Image (cartoon, helix red, strand yellow):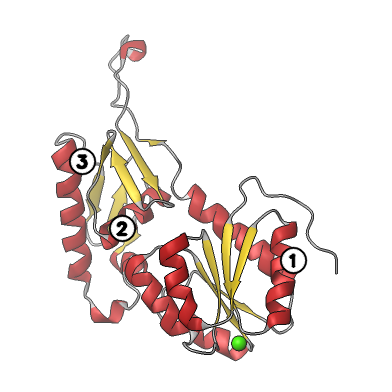
Amino acid sequence: MTPVTTTPAAPAHILIVEDEPKMAALVMDYLRAAGHRAEWRHDGRDAVPYVREHQPDLVLLDLMLPGRDGLEVCRELRTFSDVPVVMLTARVEEADRLAGLECGADDYICKTPFSPREIVARIKAILRRSRIAVPVAAPLAAPVAGAGTASAAPPGPVLRVDVESYRAYFQGALLDLTPVEFRLLRTLASAPGHVFSRDVLLTRLHHDHRAVTDRAVDSHVKNLRRKLAQIDPVCDPIRAVYGVGFRLDL
Ligand code: CA
């Protein structure tokens, strides 16, 4: 196998939590060859402190770890961070089982057969998704200009969601959002015009959505709209679609 030689446009800082040194070394080689910065921790207990301190762009997290298992680590990460998490599992059955659990991971990769190439490709896709989901400056549609006034139309409202700093700006003003509200806005902004059902939103907002109800989504949406309205009472870009869910309108 030869390491991937294509360099992604945006190198990322990736944490690998894996107790098998050979596996970790091999994955790190591939990630570095792909232009990323990779750091390795072998003990599950080191993952959360590392993420808090260094805020990596992505965490590659083994399921079976000394100290603390990957599921538990992932759940704790989700209480304070939206960092993309890719779980590594030793067996296909584990990956299947994991996919049914709401631990908040973004993807699952089985280590057998082991393909560092696939790991690098999946990481690249997830990074692209998480970065595209929140363009650095995503302008919302300008108000429709009347006849003959197109060139004089005022600039449209602007929403900016910055995943790396976990901050969102509306009309240039920083929004004071809870982590759940941030995830809600980020999700809606990932596909403007698309209607997200309450069920889908629930899975994006909470690591364990069984503990909350659909009504929780409405309550978070209400709070988010209120915060947007505090900055611009006219724009109101979030629309409720009766019986379906919510969308962010462009
Ligand atoms: Ca392991």
Residue 143 visible at all: yes
Residue depicted at 29% across the width and 61% down the height: 179
Q: Which residue is mark 3?
A: 236
In this view, the residue farthest toward the top is: 148
Residue 113 image point, x, y percent: 74, 82
Q: Amino acid at mark 2?
A: Leu
Label 2 and label 3: CA atoms lie apart by 15 Å
Q: Quadrant of the C terminus?
A: top left
Label 2 and label 1: CA atoms lie apart by 35 Å
Mark 2 or mark 1: name the one nearer the start of the chain. 1
Q: Which residue is mark 1?
A: 29
Residue 21 image point, x, y percent: 69, 81
Q: Amino acid at mark 3?
A: Asp
Q: Is residue 147 above or below residue 137?
A: above
Q: Is residue 75 left or right of residue 61?
A: left
Q: Quadrant of the N terminus?
A: bottom right
Q: Secondary structure at mark 2?
A: helix
Q: Nearer the viewer, residue 188 or 79?
A: 79
Q: Which residue is mark 2?
A: 184
Q: Is residue 204 left or right of residue 43?
A: left
Residue 208 image point, x, y percent: 32, 78
